[in-house]
Image: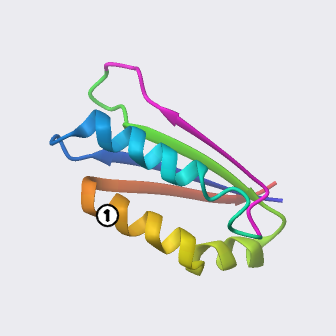
Amino acid sequence: MVTHIVFIAFKPENKIENAFEAKRRIEAMMGEVESLRSIEVGINFADKERAMDLALTARFDDREGLEAYATHPVHMKVIAFIQSVADYTKVVDYEN
């Protein structure tokens, strides 16, 4: 099993709306991206300077599944939206 975790910090403009739209788009990938086994998305409520705005955890059978997800057209559309509204992202991928 491979776990893929992404943290997103959104630009200040429309931050809350963009976080909820990103969550909706990310969750809609389930059932559309064949290698995606599960996905969980959360919007941060902690009011701390070091906090990120959104976290997602996705799981795949193997590294090949993660690679297929990374280039899947549905995922690429979600990435395009996130890149247009995010300041930056962080990622962690690991096998478990």
**How far from the left and from the top, in percent, is residue 67?**
66, 78
The residue segment tinted magenta is 35-47
Q: Is residue 14 magenta?
A: no
Q: Secondary structure at mark 1?
A: helix
**How far from the left and from the top, in percent, is residue 34?**
76, 70
Q: Residue at x 41, y 38 (%)?
A: 20
**Quadrant (top left/top right/bottom left/bottom right) for the N terminus:** bottom right
**How far from the left and from the top, in percent, is residue 72?**
60, 78
Q: Quadrant of residue 54?
A: top left
Q: Residue at x 28, y 45 (%)?
A: 10
Say which amino acid is labelled 1. Answer: Gln
Q: Residues within 10 Å of mark 1 (few under 14, many from 20)?
A: some
Query: Residue 65 vs residue 74: left or right?
Result: right
Q: Indicate whether 66 appears above or below 86.
A: below
**Quadrant (top left/top right/bottom left/bottom right) for the C terminus:** bottom right
Q: Residue at x 39, y 20 (%)?
A: 46
